[in-house]
Image (cartoon, rainbow, N blue to C red):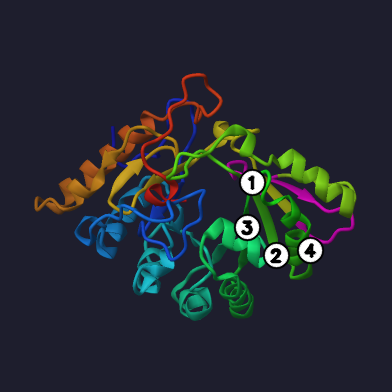
Amino acid sequence: MNAFEPLVDSFGRVHTNLRISVTDRCNIRCFYCMSDDHVDFKPREEILSYEEIERFAGVVARMGVNKVRLTGGEPLVRSDLARLVARLTAIDGIDDVALTTNGILLAEQAAVLKEAGLRRVNISLDALSEATFRRIARRDGLDRVLSGIEAARQVGFEKIRLNAVAIRGITEDEVLPLARFARERSLELRFIEYMPLDADGAWQGDHVLTGEAIRGLLAAEFGPLEATVRDDPAQPAADFAYADGQGRVGFIDPVSQPFCGDCNRLRITADGKVRNCLFSLTEWDARGLLRRSENGGKIDADIATLVRDCVAAKKPGHGIDDEGFIRPERAMYQIGG
Protein backbone atom coordinates (compact mmCIF):
# COMPACT_ATOMS: atom_id res chain seq x y z
CA MET A 1 0.00 0.00 0.00
CA ASN A 2 1.12 3.54 -0.78
CA ALA A 3 1.62 5.21 2.60
CA PHE A 4 0.01 8.39 1.29
CA GLU A 5 -3.28 6.99 0.03
CA PRO A 6 -6.51 8.63 1.31
CA LEU A 7 -7.46 8.13 4.94
CA VAL A 8 -10.45 5.79 4.99
CA ASP A 9 -11.52 4.04 8.18
CA SER A 10 -13.11 0.62 8.48
CA PHE A 11 -16.59 2.16 8.16
CA GLY A 12 -15.82 3.89 4.87
CA ARG A 13 -15.48 7.40 6.33
CA VAL A 14 -12.95 9.44 4.35
CA HIS A 15 -10.97 11.77 6.60
CA THR A 16 -10.23 15.18 5.10
CA ASN A 17 -10.47 17.45 8.15
CA LEU A 18 -7.70 18.03 10.72
CA ARG A 19 -8.06 19.82 14.07
CA ILE A 20 -4.71 21.14 15.31
CA SER A 21 -4.39 22.22 18.93
CA VAL A 22 -1.56 24.72 19.16
CA THR A 23 -1.58 25.11 22.96
CA ASP A 24 -3.28 23.79 26.07
CA ARG A 25 -3.11 27.20 27.75
CA CYS A 26 -6.03 29.59 28.02
CA ASN A 27 -6.81 33.06 29.40
CA ILE A 28 -10.20 32.08 30.87
CA ARG A 29 -11.40 29.01 32.79
CA CYS A 30 -14.74 27.83 31.36
CA PHE A 31 -16.00 25.09 33.67
CA TYR A 32 -17.02 22.82 30.78
CA CYS A 33 -13.38 22.70 29.68
CA MET A 34 -10.91 23.48 32.48
CA SER A 35 -10.51 23.59 36.23
CA ASP A 36 -10.50 26.99 37.89
CA ASP A 37 -7.05 26.41 39.36
CA HIS A 38 -4.43 23.66 39.60
CA VAL A 39 -4.39 23.34 35.82
CA ASP A 40 -1.78 20.94 34.50
CA PHE A 41 -0.20 22.64 31.48
CA LYS A 42 2.41 20.83 29.41
CA PRO A 43 6.00 22.14 29.59
CA ARG A 44 6.96 24.28 26.61
CA GLU A 45 9.44 21.68 25.33
CA GLU A 46 6.64 19.12 24.98
CA ILE A 47 4.55 21.40 22.74
CA LEU A 48 4.96 21.04 18.99
CA SER A 49 6.82 23.86 17.25
CA TYR A 50 5.25 25.59 14.27
CA GLU A 51 7.73 23.79 12.04
CA GLU A 52 6.64 20.42 13.42
CA ILE A 53 2.97 21.28 12.97
CA GLU A 54 3.65 22.39 9.42
CA ARG A 55 5.44 19.14 8.64
CA PHE A 56 2.64 17.01 10.09
CA ALA A 57 0.03 18.97 8.14
CA GLY A 58 2.08 18.55 4.97
CA VAL A 59 2.09 14.77 5.41
CA VAL A 60 -1.66 14.44 5.95
CA ALA A 61 -2.34 16.88 3.09
CA ARG A 62 -0.70 14.30 0.80
CA MET A 63 -3.28 11.84 2.17
CA GLY A 64 -6.26 14.00 1.22
CA VAL A 65 -6.68 16.30 4.22
CA ASN A 66 -7.72 19.66 2.80
CA LYS A 67 -9.25 21.49 5.77
CA VAL A 68 -7.45 22.57 8.92
CA ARG A 69 -8.84 24.18 12.06
CA LEU A 70 -6.59 25.68 14.74
CA THR A 71 -7.78 25.18 18.31
CA GLY A 72 -6.53 25.13 21.90
CA GLY A 73 -6.70 25.85 24.80
CA GLU A 74 -6.94 29.34 23.41
CA PRO A 75 -4.88 29.46 20.20
CA LEU A 76 -4.41 33.23 20.27
CA VAL A 77 -2.29 33.04 23.44
CA ARG A 78 0.36 31.28 21.32
CA SER A 79 2.86 33.84 20.10
CA ASP A 80 2.70 34.93 16.45
CA LEU A 81 -0.06 32.54 15.41
CA ALA A 82 -0.35 34.33 12.07
CA ARG A 83 3.05 32.88 11.14
CA LEU A 84 1.63 29.37 11.49
CA VAL A 85 -1.47 30.33 9.49
CA ALA A 86 0.75 31.53 6.65
CA ARG A 87 2.77 28.30 6.72
CA LEU A 88 -0.36 26.13 6.62
CA THR A 89 -2.08 28.05 3.84
CA ALA A 90 1.04 27.59 1.72
CA ILE A 91 0.85 23.78 1.89
CA ASP A 92 -0.20 22.17 -1.37
CA GLY A 93 -3.61 20.58 -0.92
CA ILE A 94 -4.73 22.64 2.09
CA ASP A 95 -7.70 24.64 0.80
CA ASP A 96 -9.06 26.08 4.02
CA VAL A 97 -7.57 27.18 7.33
CA ALA A 98 -9.96 28.19 10.12
CA LEU A 99 -9.70 29.13 13.79
CA THR A 100 -11.72 28.52 16.93
CA THR A 101 -11.12 31.17 19.61
CA ASN A 102 -12.69 32.59 22.74
CA GLY A 103 -12.28 36.00 21.09
CA ILE A 104 -10.60 37.79 23.97
CA LEU A 105 -7.42 38.52 21.97
CA LEU A 106 -9.08 38.63 18.55
CA ALA A 107 -9.47 42.41 18.26
CA GLU A 108 -5.68 42.80 18.36
CA GLN A 109 -4.96 39.96 15.93
CA ALA A 110 -7.88 39.81 13.46
CA ALA A 111 -6.25 41.89 10.73
CA VAL A 112 -2.89 40.09 10.74
CA LEU A 113 -4.61 36.67 10.79
CA LYS A 114 -6.76 37.62 7.81
CA GLU A 115 -3.69 38.88 5.97
CA ALA A 116 -1.89 35.59 6.69
CA GLY A 117 -4.66 33.64 4.94
CA LEU A 118 -7.14 32.73 7.67
CA ARG A 119 -10.53 32.33 5.99
CA ARG A 120 -12.99 31.47 8.73
CA VAL A 121 -13.29 32.03 12.46
CA ASN A 122 -15.50 30.49 15.15
CA ILE A 123 -15.85 32.61 18.27
CA SER A 124 -17.12 31.20 21.56
CA LEU A 125 -19.93 33.29 23.02
CA ASP A 126 -21.96 31.38 25.59
CA ALA A 127 -23.73 34.37 27.12
CA LEU A 128 -24.43 38.05 26.58
CA SER A 129 -25.03 38.87 30.23
CA GLU A 130 -21.96 39.70 32.30
CA ALA A 131 -23.12 37.54 35.21
CA THR A 132 -23.67 34.40 33.15
CA PHE A 133 -20.49 34.94 31.15
CA ARG A 134 -18.48 35.13 34.38
CA ARG A 135 -20.30 32.16 35.90
CA ILE A 136 -19.21 30.02 32.94
CA ALA A 137 -15.78 31.51 32.17
CA ARG A 138 -14.88 32.21 35.83
CA ARG A 139 -13.12 35.30 34.52
CA ASP A 140 -14.18 38.70 33.14
CA GLY A 141 -13.87 39.42 29.45
CA LEU A 142 -17.25 39.69 27.74
CA ASP A 143 -16.50 43.19 26.49
CA ARG A 144 -13.26 41.97 24.88
CA VAL A 145 -15.06 39.07 23.19
CA LEU A 146 -17.62 41.47 21.73
CA SER A 147 -14.80 43.72 20.51
CA GLY A 148 -13.17 40.68 18.90
CA ILE A 149 -16.38 39.80 17.09
CA GLU A 150 -16.68 43.34 15.75
CA ALA A 151 -13.03 43.32 14.64
CA ALA A 152 -13.61 40.05 12.78
CA ARG A 153 -16.56 41.64 10.99
CA GLN A 154 -14.54 44.72 10.09
CA VAL A 155 -11.63 42.82 8.52
CA GLY A 156 -14.05 40.73 6.45
CA PHE A 157 -13.48 37.07 7.22
CA GLU A 158 -15.21 34.79 4.74
CA LYS A 159 -17.34 33.30 7.50
CA ILE A 160 -17.81 34.14 11.17
CA ARG A 161 -19.63 31.74 13.47
CA LEU A 162 -20.59 32.13 17.10
CA ASN A 163 -20.42 28.97 19.23
CA ALA A 164 -22.59 28.79 22.35
CA VAL A 165 -22.33 25.85 24.73
CA ALA A 166 -25.82 25.01 25.99
CA ILE A 167 -26.07 24.13 29.70
CA ARG A 168 -29.36 23.39 31.40
CA GLY A 169 -30.09 25.63 34.35
CA ILE A 170 -27.59 28.27 33.20
CA THR A 171 -28.00 29.33 29.57
CA GLU A 172 -31.74 29.10 28.83
CA ASP A 173 -32.10 32.87 29.32
CA GLU A 174 -29.22 33.49 26.92
CA VAL A 175 -30.77 31.70 23.93
CA LEU A 176 -32.97 34.52 22.62
CA PRO A 177 -30.47 37.35 23.22
CA LEU A 178 -27.78 35.36 21.42
CA ALA A 179 -30.14 34.65 18.52
CA ARG A 180 -31.04 38.33 18.20
CA PHE A 181 -27.39 39.36 18.42
CA ALA A 182 -26.43 36.99 15.60
CA ARG A 183 -29.45 37.84 13.41
CA GLU A 184 -28.84 41.59 13.70
CA ARG A 185 -25.23 41.15 12.55
CA SER A 186 -25.80 38.45 9.90
CA LEU A 187 -23.65 36.00 11.82
CA GLU A 188 -24.11 32.25 12.04
CA LEU A 189 -24.90 30.99 15.53
CA ARG A 190 -24.40 27.41 16.65
CA PHE A 191 -25.57 25.93 19.92
CA ILE A 192 -23.42 23.06 21.17
CA GLU A 193 -24.61 20.54 23.71
CA TYR A 194 -22.53 20.36 26.89
CA MET A 195 -20.23 17.32 26.62
CA PRO A 196 -18.47 15.16 29.25
CA LEU A 197 -15.04 16.69 28.67
CA ASP A 198 -14.77 19.04 31.66
CA ALA A 199 -11.62 18.78 33.75
CA ASP A 200 -13.54 18.58 37.04
CA GLY A 201 -15.58 15.57 35.98
CA ALA A 202 -18.81 17.28 37.06
CA TRP A 203 -20.78 16.65 33.84
CA GLN A 204 -24.07 14.83 34.14
CA GLY A 205 -26.61 14.03 31.47
CA ASP A 206 -29.28 16.22 33.02
CA HIS A 207 -26.97 19.24 32.63
CA VAL A 208 -27.38 19.04 28.84
CA LEU A 209 -29.65 21.66 27.30
CA THR A 210 -30.58 19.81 24.12
CA GLY A 211 -30.78 21.23 20.65
CA GLU A 212 -34.43 20.20 20.53
CA ALA A 213 -35.21 22.28 23.63
CA ILE A 214 -33.43 25.31 22.17
CA ARG A 215 -35.27 24.96 18.86
CA GLY A 216 -38.50 25.12 20.82
CA LEU A 217 -37.45 28.39 22.46
CA LEU A 218 -36.43 29.91 19.14
CA ALA A 219 -39.56 28.79 17.30
CA ALA A 220 -41.78 30.31 19.98
CA GLU A 221 -40.06 33.67 19.46
CA PHE A 222 -39.22 33.77 15.76
CA GLY A 223 -41.61 31.27 14.18
CA PRO A 224 -41.04 27.76 12.82
CA LEU A 225 -37.49 26.74 11.94
CA GLU A 226 -36.98 24.96 8.63
CA ALA A 227 -34.25 22.33 8.32
CA THR A 228 -31.77 23.10 5.52
CA VAL A 229 -29.55 20.86 3.43
CA ARG A 230 -26.10 20.59 4.96
CA ASP A 231 -23.41 22.48 3.04
CA ASP A 232 -21.09 19.57 3.83
CA PRO A 233 -22.52 16.13 4.72
CA ALA A 234 -19.72 15.68 7.26
CA GLN A 235 -20.32 18.94 9.11
CA PRO A 236 -21.28 18.41 12.75
CA ALA A 237 -24.12 20.93 12.79
CA ALA A 238 -27.70 20.57 11.65
CA ASP A 239 -28.70 23.96 10.26
CA PHE A 240 -32.14 25.56 10.31
CA ALA A 241 -33.46 28.66 8.57
CA TYR A 242 -35.59 31.22 10.38
CA ALA A 243 -39.14 31.56 9.09
CA ASP A 244 -38.66 35.26 8.31
CA GLY A 245 -35.61 34.55 6.16
CA GLN A 246 -33.27 36.40 8.51
CA GLY A 247 -30.40 33.96 8.63
CA ARG A 248 -29.78 30.48 9.95
CA VAL A 249 -29.00 28.81 13.24
CA GLY A 250 -27.13 25.54 13.75
CA PHE A 251 -27.18 22.82 16.38
CA ILE A 252 -24.32 20.52 17.30
CA ASP A 253 -25.98 17.79 19.35
CA PRO A 254 -23.35 15.14 20.12
CA VAL A 255 -25.23 13.90 23.19
CA SER A 256 -28.85 13.77 22.04
CA GLN A 257 -28.30 13.34 18.28
CA PRO A 258 -24.81 11.88 17.61
CA PHE A 259 -23.46 12.54 14.12
CA CYS A 260 -20.56 10.09 14.22
CA GLY A 261 -21.65 8.23 11.10
CA ASP A 262 -20.43 11.06 8.87
CA CYS A 263 -17.39 12.12 10.90
CA ASN A 264 -14.35 12.97 8.76
CA ARG A 265 -12.16 14.55 11.45
CA LEU A 266 -8.92 13.62 13.12
CA ARG A 267 -6.99 15.61 15.70
CA ILE A 268 -3.50 16.32 16.89
CA THR A 269 -2.99 17.65 20.39
CA ALA A 270 -0.62 20.45 21.29
CA ASP A 271 1.89 17.87 22.53
CA GLY A 272 1.76 15.91 19.30
CA LYS A 273 -0.65 13.04 20.01
CA VAL A 274 -2.96 12.01 17.17
CA ARG A 275 -6.56 11.16 18.08
CA ASN A 276 -9.37 9.81 15.92
CA CYS A 277 -12.15 11.10 18.21
CA LEU A 278 -12.66 13.65 20.97
CA PHE A 279 -13.59 10.72 23.22
CA SER A 280 -10.83 8.35 22.17
CA LEU A 281 -9.07 6.49 24.96
CA THR A 282 -6.02 5.87 22.75
CA GLU A 283 -3.49 8.28 21.25
CA TRP A 284 -0.74 7.86 18.66
CA ASP A 285 2.55 9.69 19.27
CA ALA A 286 3.48 11.79 16.24
CA ARG A 287 5.84 14.02 18.22
CA GLY A 288 8.28 11.18 18.70
CA LEU A 289 8.46 10.67 14.94
CA LEU A 290 8.66 14.38 14.16
CA ARG A 291 11.68 14.71 16.44
CA ARG A 292 13.63 11.76 15.09
CA SER A 293 16.86 12.61 13.28
CA GLU A 294 16.60 10.00 10.53
CA ASN A 295 16.08 10.52 6.82
CA GLY A 296 13.26 13.01 6.27
CA GLY A 297 11.45 10.98 3.64
CA LYS A 298 11.33 7.90 5.85
CA ILE A 299 9.96 9.93 8.77
CA ASP A 300 7.18 11.32 6.58
CA ALA A 301 6.22 7.79 5.54
CA ASP A 302 6.28 6.66 9.17
CA ILE A 303 4.04 9.58 10.17
CA ALA A 304 1.64 8.64 7.38
CA THR A 305 1.55 5.05 8.62
CA LEU A 306 0.91 6.20 12.18
CA VAL A 307 -1.99 8.40 11.07
CA ARG A 308 -3.42 5.59 8.96
CA ASP A 309 -3.25 3.23 11.95
CA CYS A 310 -5.04 5.83 14.06
CA VAL A 311 -7.84 6.27 11.52
CA ALA A 312 -8.16 2.50 11.02
CA ALA A 313 -8.77 2.09 14.76
CA LYS A 314 -11.64 4.60 14.82
CA LYS A 315 -14.84 3.28 16.39
CA PRO A 316 -18.30 3.71 14.85
CA GLY A 317 -19.22 6.37 17.42
CA HIS A 318 -18.15 8.20 20.56
CA GLY A 319 -20.27 5.98 22.80
CA ILE A 320 -21.51 8.64 25.25
CA ASP A 321 -24.81 6.80 25.57
CA ASP A 322 -23.22 3.36 25.85
CA GLU A 323 -23.59 1.63 29.21
CA GLY A 324 -19.85 1.09 29.41
CA PHE A 325 -18.85 4.62 28.35
CA ILE A 326 -15.52 5.72 29.81
CA ARG A 327 -14.59 9.39 29.84
CA PRO A 328 -11.20 10.20 28.33
CA GLU A 329 -8.54 11.12 30.88
CA ARG A 330 -7.83 14.37 29.10
CA ALA A 331 -10.20 17.34 29.30
CA MET A 332 -11.23 19.48 26.34
CA TYR A 333 -8.42 22.01 26.75
CA GLN A 334 -5.85 19.18 26.66
CA ILE A 335 -7.31 17.63 23.51
CA GLY A 336 -8.32 20.60 21.40
CA GLY A 337 -11.87 21.73 20.70
Q: Residue furthest left?
A: 294
Q: Nearer the viewer, residue 17 or 39?
A: 39
State which region is magenta: 230-248
242 in magenta: yes
Q: CA distance from mark 1 to mark 3?
A: 9 Å
- Packing grade of label 1 (10 A; few <14, some 14-19, many >=20) is many
Please name the predominant secondary structure of the magenta segment in the image: loop
Q: Which residue is mark 1?
A: 167
Is residue 320 among what the camera can see? yes
Q: Earlier in the sequence, mark 4 or mark 3?
A: 3
Q: Which residue is mark 2?
A: 187
Q: Earlier in the sequence, mark 1 or mark 3?
A: 3
Q: Which residue is mark 3?
A: 126
> Looking at the image, is mark 4 or mark 2 nearer the viewer?
4
CB under 8 Å between discs 1 and 4? no
Q: CA distance from mark 4 to mark 3?
A: 14 Å
Q: CA distance from mark 4 to mark 2?
A: 10 Å
Q: Nearer the viewer, residue 263 or 22?
A: 22
Question: Residue at image x 23%, y 61%?
Answer: 44
Q: What element does badge 1 sit on?
A: loop
Q: Which residue is mark 4?
A: 180
- Packing grade of label 3 (10 A; few <14, some 14-19, many >=20) is many
Q: CA distance from mark 2 to mark 1?
A: 22 Å
